[in-house]
Amino acid sequence: MTRSELFAQIQQKSSFLCVGLDPDLEKIPRHLLAEPDPIFSFCKAIIEETADFAVAYKPNIAFFEAMGSKGWDTLAKVEELIPADIFTIADAKRGDIGNTSKLYAKAFFESMDFDSITVAPYMGEDSVTPFLEFENKWVILLALTSNKGSLDFQLIQDQNGKALYQSVLEKSQAWGTPDNLMYVVGATRGELIGEVRKAAPEHFFLVPGVGAQGGSLSEVAKYGMNSSCGLLVNSSRGIIYASNEKDFGKAARKEAEKLQLEMKELLDKYL
């Protein structure tokens, strides 16, 4: 998917919502466990009920990998369910030496046809650039994340006072462009989103941490939105686990619509 196609969908739906698919067998509604493939049935209902409001879906690959070969089959079926005009993110956090990264890229971009993949930058340029060689595919590079452990490394400063995440932003922009490179920027970092936006004014950000993790959607938009929106705000638990009863799909739809309406107001305000 191209940048212009993604922005067109944001405008059409008045939304920059990404729904995270984190299907945990211990959390999905109990009645689904009688299904031949409970995870598929769960994701199917979530996608069908939220597709009107979502511009992206982000399957967390770990929840599928944990089930072995059956999980990979389920992931493929789930990916096929997502409408073709909705951006797909393989949340796999890959990143290895070049020849290995190239095969990871082939797996997710060719075998499964995802639009994008999350990548860890720790091993540097040669571990990232193989993912950038695929036309109309995207790398979503971890920059400033919302987890507690992010403080262990990402804010460490060098002798010139530059934080590690700032070095990641600076160096990586020489590898890709705003047309194929996004950044993960956690919503719980508040005003730091503004610092990331200054360093990467044109790039899209994938923003987790809104909802269950306490991030503020209005703060994200205030500090992070640019002239083409430039944001994909992810909500996982707050949508997909809104109910653990048979109405879970309808409950997910209600939460997705609530976020979309907030997003419409913010788009009207800033664009």
Image: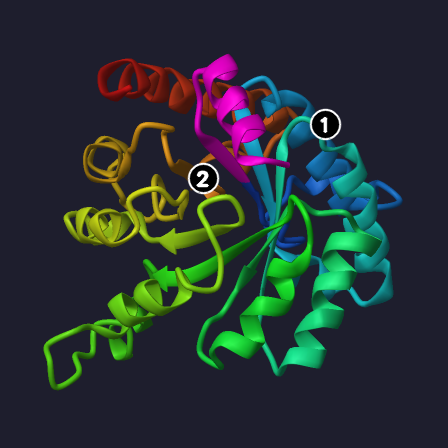
Amino acid type at circle 1 is Pro
Q: Which mark is residue 83?
A: 1
Give how far across and how far down residue 139 sits, in percent: 55, 56
The residue sitting at 17% across, 83% down in the picture is 158
Where is residue 43, by image quadrant? top right
Q: Nearer the viewer, residue 78 or 10?
A: 10
* Secondary structure state at the residue bearing disc 2: strand
Q: Is residue 155 magenta?
A: no
Q: Quadrant of the C terminus?
A: top left
Q: Is residue 109 above or below residue 244?
A: below
- For mark 2, what is the residue? 235
The residue sitting at 49% across, 75% down in the picture is 125
Where is residue 80, by image quadrant? top right
Q: Which residues are magenta?
A: 1-19
Give how far across and how far down residue 35 sits, in percent: 84, 41
The colour scheme applied to this rendered structure is rainbow
Residue 258 visible, this angle: yes
Q: Nearer the viewer, residue 201 or 264?
A: 201
Q: Nearer the viewer, residue 255 or 260?
A: 260
The residue lying furthest to the bottom in this view is 159
